[in-house]
């Protein structure tokens, strides 16, 4: 149900798309047994590297995504949600920085554009 007082901008639609993609990815991820996916214990690389702040650690994690059964889907999610922190589909948040900046600009710009319409 949609509240008619809320304007649906491109920004809102993008947030909804990203939330749906995240839900979908994590629902499938939860069906894999522990150790079947590199970021969930299926790699000698510690799971904490996938969400580390340090670019070097994320780069190690991104390389460890190779061979993950979900890599393609995870990479597709990273394209829809470049602002997500951490490693997805073999790309670190630093690899996605150009897309993240574009996304941030669009997020800031969308409400202003909507109010000028
Ligand atoms: S591709 Fe995605 S699910 Fe697979 S190890 Fe990398 S981050 Fe985890």
Image (cartoon, rainbow, N blue to C red):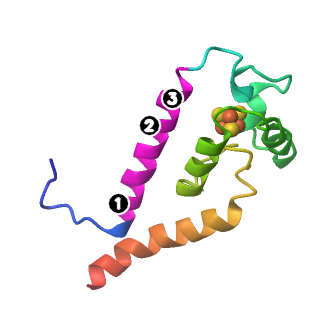
Give the residue number, with chain letter if any, for mark 2.
23
Q: Residue at x 45, y 37 (%)?
A: 24
Picture layout, residue 71 above or below residue 32: below
Residue 77 lies, in percent from the top left, at 56, 48
Main SS category, magenta section: helix
Position of 83 with respect to 97 (left or right) is left
Q: Which residues are magenta?
A: 11-31
Q: Which mark is residue 13?
A: 1
Give the residue number, with chain letter if any, for mark 3.
28
Q: Residue at x 29, y 85 (%)?
A: 116
- Judged by depth in the image, the label closer to the viewer, 3 or 1, is 3
Distance CA(mark 3)–CA(mark 2): 9 Å
Residue 38 lies, in percent from the top left, at 74, 27
Q: Quadrant of residue 42?
A: top right
Find out whether residue 53 is within the magenta segment: no
Q: Which mark is residue 52?
A: none
């Amino acid at each position: 149900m949609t509240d008619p007082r809320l304007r649906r901008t491109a920004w809102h639609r993008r947030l909804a798309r990203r939330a749906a993609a995240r839900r979908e990815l994590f629902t499938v991820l939860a069906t894999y047994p522990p150790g079947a996916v590199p970021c969930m214990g299926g790699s000698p690389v510690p799971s904490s590297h996938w969400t580390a702040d340090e670019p070097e650690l994320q780069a190690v994690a991104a390389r460890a995504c190779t061979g993950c059964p979900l890599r393609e889907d995870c990479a597709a999610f990273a394209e829809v949600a470049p602002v997500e922190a951490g490693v997805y589909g073999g790309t670190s948040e630093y690899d996605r920085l150009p897309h993240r900046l574009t996304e941030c600009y669009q997020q800031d710009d969308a409400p202003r554009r909507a109010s000028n319409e």
